[in-house]
Image: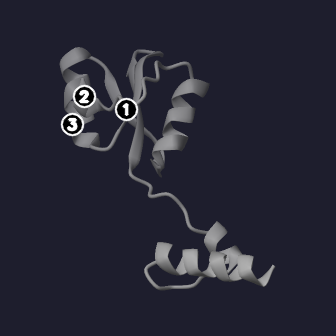
Amino acid sequence: MSTMRNATARWRAVANRGLILTDKECSAVKKPRDTYRFVVRLGPAFVEGGITDDLGRAKDQARLRWPLGQFHQVGEITTTDDAQEWLKRNGFVASPGLFARDL
């Protein structure tokens, strides 16, 4: 049992650049928040929704496709996994790795 603890502690030391973290601290390590969610409205209808890591570029591209549409950021910056889940929940087309920069 202590061999397992020592192996786990060594792994944590390597993974965390020399810092040994407790189990509670390891579970608190989060993924980076680097993804924005957005929607484009045309009147009362949502015509497009998506995720991006560059909100300005997504807004410019949406203006080209929907000149009369209104661009809205949805919520705050989030993780990519959470943003893709949001796409699925709201019925937007979710392609793996599809960001506004790829359109």
Pointer 1 residue: 97
Look at 42% across and 28% down and name the residue there: 96
Mark 3, Cα crowd under 10 Å, few <14 / some 14-19 / many 20+, is few
Q: Is mark 2 on a helix, strand or loop?
A: helix
Position of residue 18 relative to residue 37, above or below, is below
Which residue lies under the disc numbered 2? 102
| Label disc, if present, on residue 57 of the rendered structure | 3
Label 1–label 2 contact, CB within 8 A: yes
Question: Looking at the image, which is closer to me, 15 or 31?
Answer: 15
Q: What residue sits 57% from the left and 80% below the top?
A: 10
x then y, percent, for residue 3: 73, 81
> Which amino acid type corresponds to the residue marked 1 in the rendered image?
Gly
Report if the CB atoms under discs 2 and 3 are less than 8 Å apart: no
In terms of secondary structure, where does tag 1 sit? loop
Dot placed on the residue nearer the N-terminal end, 1 or 2: 1
Q: Residue at image x 50%, y 34%?
A: 84
Res 39 quadrant in image: top left
Q: Which of 19 and 32 is in front in this view?
A: 19
Q: Position of residue 89 (x, y in %)?
A: 61, 26
The quarter in which the C terminus is drawn is: top left
Mark toward the start of the polypeptide (2 vs 3): 3
6 to 102, vertically: above or below: below
How many angstroms separate mark 1 from mark 2 (CA)? 9 Å
Residue 67, can we see it?
Answer: no
Q: Nearer the viewer, residue 62 or 84?
A: 84
Please tell me whether mark 3 or mark 1 is closer to you in this view. Answer: 1
Quarter residue 50 falls in: top left
